[in-house]
Image: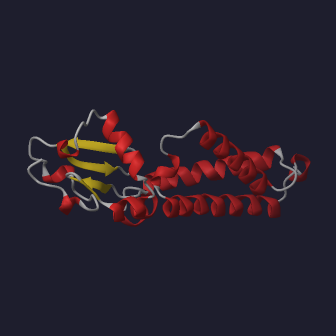
Amino acid sequence: MDWMEYGLDWVDAVRVVASCVAFYFGIILLLRVFGQRTLANLSSFDLASIIAIGAIIGRSILGDTPTLVGGALALATLLILQAVTGAGRRFGLIRGVVNSPAVVLMAGPEMLTHNLAKSHVDRDEVVAKLRSAGIRNRDEVACVILESTGQISVIRRGSPIDEDILEGVIGAERVPREG
């Protein structure tokens, strides 16, 4: 069987796989640089941008003339990379590269401006989250945390916070322990 009938030879196959791997790790790197909030709570504009970026990446991976075999190979490579990355999240090194740690953005009534800047979260986003959580006064807040998923959590003062709830959270030492 001549694979060129289907529009792909071995050189093209290697190029497709190498391009997929490069783009996959390039995207992970960009998400680490720009923060986990990049993909959280997507607006219509963000979604349109991601679709356009996906189209550009797809064309770049497949070359000028996408083929059925080239497209299938690119899709299979990306799915394999996703599966390997998902399985690798159980191990420290890969988990540290792929998953962003949770970060305290507000400890008690104090906004942690360094953590906000480092996490690419705007003060107004935190204030909006406080309002949506029903917070009327900053003294009601035990902490606000940017989760590894990109979502923002608000924990109210009240009962003491269990140590394991804040385990591995950057800035947890600043959170008042009395809740």
- Give the x, y percent position of residue 153: 31, 43
Residue at the location (56% across, 38% down)? 43
Q: Residue at x 27, y 32 (%)?
A: 134
Q: Residue at x 24, y 36 (%)?
A: 136
Is 46 left, or right, of 174 in this rendering? Answer: right
The x and y percentages for residue 78 are 62, 51
Q: Nearer the viewer, residue 127 or 168?
A: 127
Give the total number of marks visible in the rendering. Answer: 0
Along the viewing direction, whichever of 27 and 155 lies nearer the viewer: 155
Residue 119 point in image, percent of width and height: 41, 59
Snapshot quadrant of residue 92? bottom left
The coloring applied to the image is secondary structure
Relative to residue 9, is residue 25 drawn left or right?
left
Question: Can residue 149 be seen at all in this image of the molecule?
Answer: no
- Identify the residue at the far front of this view: 137
143 relative to 87 in the view: left or right:
left
Q: Position of residue 129 (x, y in %)?
A: 35, 40
Task: Tell me, yes or no, if residue 143 can be seen here.
Answer: yes
